[in-house]
Amino acid sequence: MAVIGPGNIGSDLMYKIFRSKYLEMGMMAGIVESEGIKRAASHGVAVSTEGVKAVAVRKDIKIAFDATSASAHLRFNGPALKEAGIVSVDLTPAAVGPYCVPSVNLDQLRDEPDINMVTCGGQATIPIVHAVARVAGAAYAEIVACISSKSAGPGTRANMDEFTETTSKALEVVGGADKGKAIIVLNPAEPPLMMTNTILVRVKDPSAGIDRITSSINEIVDELKAYVPGYRLRVPPILEGDKVTTIVQVEGQGDFLPAYSGNLDIINAAAVAAAEKIAQRMLAEGRGA
Amino acid sequence: MMADQKIRLVDTTLRDGSHAVKHSFTREQAAAIAGGLDKCGVPMIELSHGDGLGGSSYTYGFSGTSEFELLKAAAEQIKRARLTVLLLPGIGTIEDLKRAYECGARAVRVATHVTEGDVSAQHIAAAKDMGMMAVGFLMMVHMATPERIAEEARKMESYGADYINLADSAGYLLPEGVCERIEAVRGAVGIPVGFHAHNNLGLAAANSLAAVKSGASYIDGTLRGLGAGAGNTQMEVIAGVLQRCGYETGVDFYGLQDHAQSAVDPLMLRPQVIDNGSLMLGYAGVYSSFLLHVYDAAKRYGVEARDILVELGRRKMVGGQEDMIIDVAYGLKQKG
């Protein structure tokens, strides 16, 4: 494994890789000598400030997380990794490859060279939309993601539209809603609030009933908890007419980032879950390093 | 401040007022209200969903008629005024703004929570690229110090904002709180400053006057005060107040009164008074648009509306977090 982009996200990914049974941290690559590079080196990880170039020449690296920016992924990292035959797990909103939400569609993604992890809000809400859609259909899905100001980095702040547009689209493509709408709110309260997401779905078949909807949601929450232990229902599903309302909260695992930044934890945990699956497949096919 | 200061009145009946009619404005209403305001010489007319472009949703209420249709209807009636939209990054997008431009919008107010001005950079820049006037709109200004507000205003100025508008979205501020904030921003930026009040503590007109005396040159108002919570500064009232004080606004004072009576009185769903919930918004510092959603949730969950409002204030919820009303109501019911 390599991590490109040694910022907060990249550092948290590194600690998650250390904990993984299937992944091994092979390199942390950045473009300048940074705190993140020093941190990785202090853990005995090979580091480079040559960016993706240093990763591409390492024959033993099979999968790379891209935790840089959408433009860097589009222009440099994505093409270079593809050329080198390294699978990209893209945490930027570049969305070159298909969207991946592990509890929903990981099994359908086979041998893709580049998979995209949507957004933090997408990872937290799409599984719920999918759980509702599979038992009652979803004509419309709307989500409101509230994240603490402290956990919204400059990338998110400079490009709010990427969040809303990518999440809206993935609510449709992966969540299974005919129409998706995503809203993001930053809250500066101190101490910082936990990431909270409200999911509202207009179902096609209210006669599916609240019991079936609830058990479908509970099932997927259990699957999510396997990789995001801090995921929980704050308000269990409520059915009013054809509207299902659910509120979830995501507490981070505190690997590197504070527990309130559940938004960052969930996208990283999802990326690791996806990489583990890819690694297991490679090992089974005898392609492992 | 000199009394010969020119004040630009910004009407937001068709935007903030949208909350009070649960986003049910029709094309005919939009055309009539905008047309009349234009005739009365109001220089800026804001129209969009109450929560800005793209606000039509479960969370904020669905629009009866698409805001783009309403913009087109209003644009046809406007000869002099600048048709303006509100955009909250995180809700509306640049795509929405482009569509609004095609429908006749020529100014956008890009609104962020008072401490989060940097999320407006992309949208202000896009507006300037389209040749639109762009306003940096800081909401919930009671939640930050004058120094912090000045810092955020400077950022918005650097992105290209044409003026900075401070919004007392909770109707919480007292006149001195308004003055120190306007003065701080005036001292920090080289562009004009404006003010947007809510009447939850009965101070909307007084606070707007205080803002003008501190150097604000753009003042928001709505006909009959139609708006979220206890409503906004009543346009025809502030026009009269400013005229009494000798400020130049260029609007037709009698005309605004007649227009409010004929175009707005008939469509009001409830009297725009300071009811108990509105008073608690101002007292607890809660975003005014939460009010009607709180009343709905109180009824559905069988809990006291004021308890929901106080808890929302304690949790420091910001504009756009209407979804948390359900969270609080559900929590109160469980404790019940």
Image: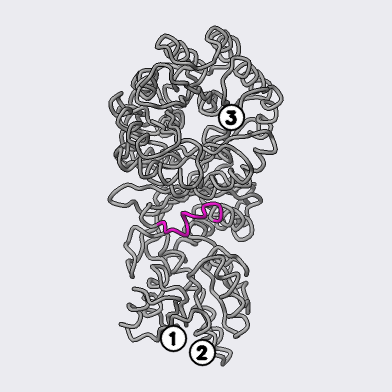
Relative to B40, does residue B98 appear above or below in the rendering? below
The picture places residue B108, in percent across and down from the top left corner, at 56, 37
Contact, mark 2 vs mark 1 (Cβ under 8 Å)? yes
Q: Which mark is residue A26?
A: 1
Q: Amino acid at mark 3?
A: Leu
Please tell me how crowded label 2 is: few (under 14), some (14-19), or many (20+) other residues with Cα within 10 Å: some
Q: CA distance from mark 2 to mark 1?
A: 9 Å
Please tell me how crowded label 3 is: few (under 14), some (14-19), or many (20+) other residues with Cα within 10 Å: many
Relative to B163, does residue A72 appear above or below in the rendering? below
| Residue A202 as seen in the image, left or right of residue A155 | right
State whether discs 3 and 2 lie on one chain. Answer: no
Q: Chain of mark 2?
A: A
The color scheme shown is one colour
Q: Quadrant of the C terminus of chain B?
A: top left
The picture places residue A96, in percent across and down from the top left corner, at 62, 68
State whether discs 3 and 1 lie on one chain. Answer: no
Q: CA distance from mark 3 to mark 1?
A: 55 Å
Q: Which mark is residue A58?
A: 2
Q: Read off the residue under disc 3.
A: B47
